[in-house]
Amino acid sequence: MNYFSSILRSGIVLMLLVFFASNLFGQNPPKSATPAPALPTREISGIVKDSTDLGVIGATVTLTSDKDTLKTSTNNDGIFIFKNVKSATYTILITSIGYTNSKPMRFKQNDMTPRIVMDPIFLKDESNTLNTVVINGTPSITYKTDTVEYKASDYVVRKNATVDELLKKMEGMEVGTDGSLIHQGQAVTKAKLNGKEFIGGDLANAIKNLPAEIVDKIQMVDDYGDQAARTGIKDGDPERILNITTRVDKSVGNQLNLSGAAGNNDRYEGDLFANRINQNQTIGLRGDFRNTVNGVAGGNGGGSATGGTTAAGSGSVSVRDKIGKKIEYNFNYRIGGNNVNSLSETESLSFARISTSTYDVFTTSASNSNNDARNHQLRLELEVPLDSLNFLRVVPSFQYNSTSSLSNSSSLQRSSFQPLNQNRTTDNNNKNTNPELGGSVFFQHSFKANRRRNFSVQAELNTNDYSAEQSQIQNTDYLDLSGNNTGNQYTNRLIVRKNLRDNYRGSATYVEPLSLNTQLEFNAQLNYNGYDNSATTRNITPTGLSSTIDSLSNIFKYSFTQGRVALNFRYGMSNMSKVRFSAGITGIPAQLSGTKLSLGTTIDRKSFNVIPIARFEYLWSRQHRISFNYNGNANEPTFDQIQPVRDVSNPNNPVVGNPNLLATFTHSLRTDYNNYIANSKLNYSVRINANFTDNAVIRNNVLIPDFAVTPAQGQSRPLITETRFVNVNGVYRINGDYSISKQLNNRKYNLTFRGNANYDHRISMLRGDLNVNTVKTFYERFGPRINPTEWFEVVPTVSYRHETSVNSLAELRGNEINTLALNLEGRIYFLQSFIFGYDASKNYVSGINSNISRNPFIINMNVEKEFFERRGKVSLQVFDALNQNNFISRDQNSDGGYVDTKSNALSRYFLVRLSMRLQKWSGAKGRNGGDVRRRGDGSFL
């Protein structure tokens, strides 16, 4: 059988060979095939991504071959395109700041394909940043979670410029002459250097003294506190802070800035700023003294609402360093004092309802006060990484404030209803002290099996002991409609106040990772606030002090305890996730209890509220994102608001509480949209905030006869205002703002648009009748920065503000204010070392009848001479050259009235200033000669 099988297989093979051979030789003789010619050119495209799978904007892509040498940059989505590429065999090299350069990648593609789409190319994050290199097209702005990051090397400033000059070049920044900073319409509150508070967080001193040349990145951070930074659990509203990260090659250095100025009318200023930076180590010393005018008008059409002078001095020392190998500390001590002589004049309108009639009440007042204050602040932050899994932070703090003040004021109140007319003068002499001791301890443990699983606890203590002594002389003349005196009340009293406040807070947090992209968070808090207050009043008589007047005294002790228990689910923990959100729920039990000894009352009330938690964020790219946030907050009425008895400790304004008041609940919604198109150098952002309040506590002001005054024969008894409280619904506020920045011609022209719209729906009560007061505000501002050459810089700004106030009660008048503000500031550099600077603002105001000057024109100017390569400078400064700093500011009241405050500062003066900046910088070095490694906030590992 094996033999026959072998013969059968051989036969089949032979037959197949014969078949193929006959077909082969039966065809025409073969001709040699000619391949199709290769295309002369082609289009090659691809995408560059980072480790989060997001496109890398502005990466430089180089394509080389034996026929090509081409270079381009990735667009806003990380895509690059090469057109007219001559060879299908080529090498790609990609570089981008913040990423490790790719190795040369060789590709051999089909030369017959007209459009070649490559697979995604991934770049790795660079662990250390070397000397900054300017690469055209790289993104200047990056949006991260709670952080907007600017790359400093993209913004050109003059040699020896300071950080404030650098910030002025950046999109969305507004820098005031006083060192204030607004980012995308939101005020910045403090400064950090490489992730830690710098000189106590003093923003103005940081940006006006640190040199721009040492800056690697500027970060604008929405800060939720140190605990949130480590646990990721955010509670409440953030504050916006500035974090400056230094260049690696200029993170070690010494700096000394000295400045002194003197002028007419006894004006003088002096400043000292000394600083030592060595990577994480910083040592800072600052001191200043000055005698200046309050409220010299700045640019942008702004004005001041006070007058007078201020003599002030302060000093601080700050040290950030390590003790041994583990303990890091950040110490700051500040001492300060000022003597402020303040002048103020106001005119106001309010409304009084008597029976079915409503009367306008006009009040004019003037005050002159002298306030002498002293303060000490000490804060020490200790951080100890106990081991790789355990972290401890201890922060003790202490501050002491004392004030001594003298003031005298007069007010004239007039109305067509006689009992409301009066003329009052008041003299006050106040002395107070306020020591405050605080501290916090934070401990976090991470589990070895999964570092994202962690447990943390925090405890805080704060105690404040305030004591004050006030002697008050008050004389009130009651007037008829013709201005004649119908009665008089004279008092000379001594009021002694003692307020002791204790605050204790404890919290515990546990984070359980569910997957690489999700986690569950649990947080529990307990807050206790205890108050022990007393205000005793005595009359000062010719024979001495009287006994305590019980009806004018207020002695009470109470506490407010609130707990919070929150469970939250979070998605988007992975760097690859474009969608990030959290959702959860918070339960808040609370108790308010206390006694009022002066009135013999006791309060004990409990409540429980449930608040949802919701956050959402979507990232199209590192430069393009949108976020939504919701939070709720419940607040119990204050102790005085729920006392059911009449409190006459202030005889001119007795208060009656309402024990039936409910807790106020506020819903807050916030939406942020940000986009930066790198190749177009276009940045725009939109923010919308909305707050809706349930059971808002408002005042119900009622006029009652003043039985302490005996009227003249035939005259009515004068009236005083009694305050009561009620709950109302329907209070809400919606605010939206936007910011657009477009830079042209290599940032020589920066066009900036900013504006906001505000709708404030307020509710007040006038003798039992509800009044809805609606305030609408629209503000638009256009401020281009023009710097076509190195020697010329100009910033023209135009802004328009429209504000209306309308009331639902027909008898209450509304009002409308329009302000057109023109401002022109700039600098001209000439003869190599001379600078002429100017700042002129013109206001056109309508709607304020009491305006001193409807169109004030403020001009400030200076001439500077630089020497020692801009390290030294002598200047002549002139403030308010036309002496027109006489603005009116108006505050709209929820009851439909307003308060106009006049500025009467003597603000025209000049100063001659001499300043010197000395500095030397060098590069940081890695441990044991290795690479320099840093965290995202700039701190060195």
Image (cartoon, rainbow, N blue to C red):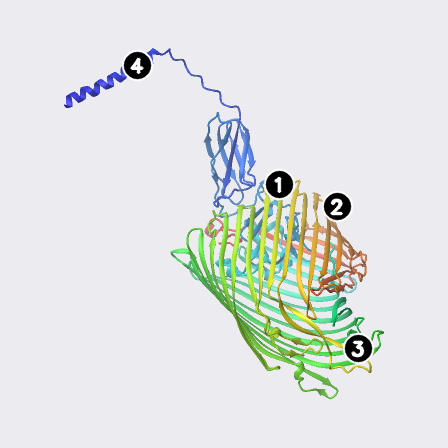
Between marks 1 and 2, how big is the CA–CA gap? 35 Å
**Labels 4, 2: front one:** 4
Which labelled disc corresponds to residue 831? 2
Between marks 3 and 4, how big is the CA–CA gap? 132 Å
Precedes in sequence: disc 1 or disc 2: 1
> Could you say where residue 320 lies in the image, as x and y percent from the top left?
54, 61
Between marks 4 and 1, how big is the CA–CA gap? 69 Å
Residue 458 visible in image: no
Classify residue 190 as left or right of residue 350.
left
**Labels 4, 1: front one:** 4
Q: Amino acid at mark 2?
A: Leu
List the residue tagged with mark 1: 680
Mark 1 falls on what kind of element? helix
Q: Amino acid at mark 3?
A: Tyr
Label 3–label 4 contact, CB within 8 A: no
Which labelled disc corresponds to residue 140? none
Classify residue 337 as left or right of residue 228.
right
List the residue tagged with mark 4: 21
Q: Amino acid at mark 4?
A: Ala
Structural crowding at the residue carrying mark 1, measured as other residues with C-alpha within 10 Å and reported as few (<14), some (14–19) or many (≥20):
some
Q: Amino acid at mark 1?
A: Ser
Residue 677 visible in image: yes
Q: Nearer the viewer, residue 827 or 745?
A: 745
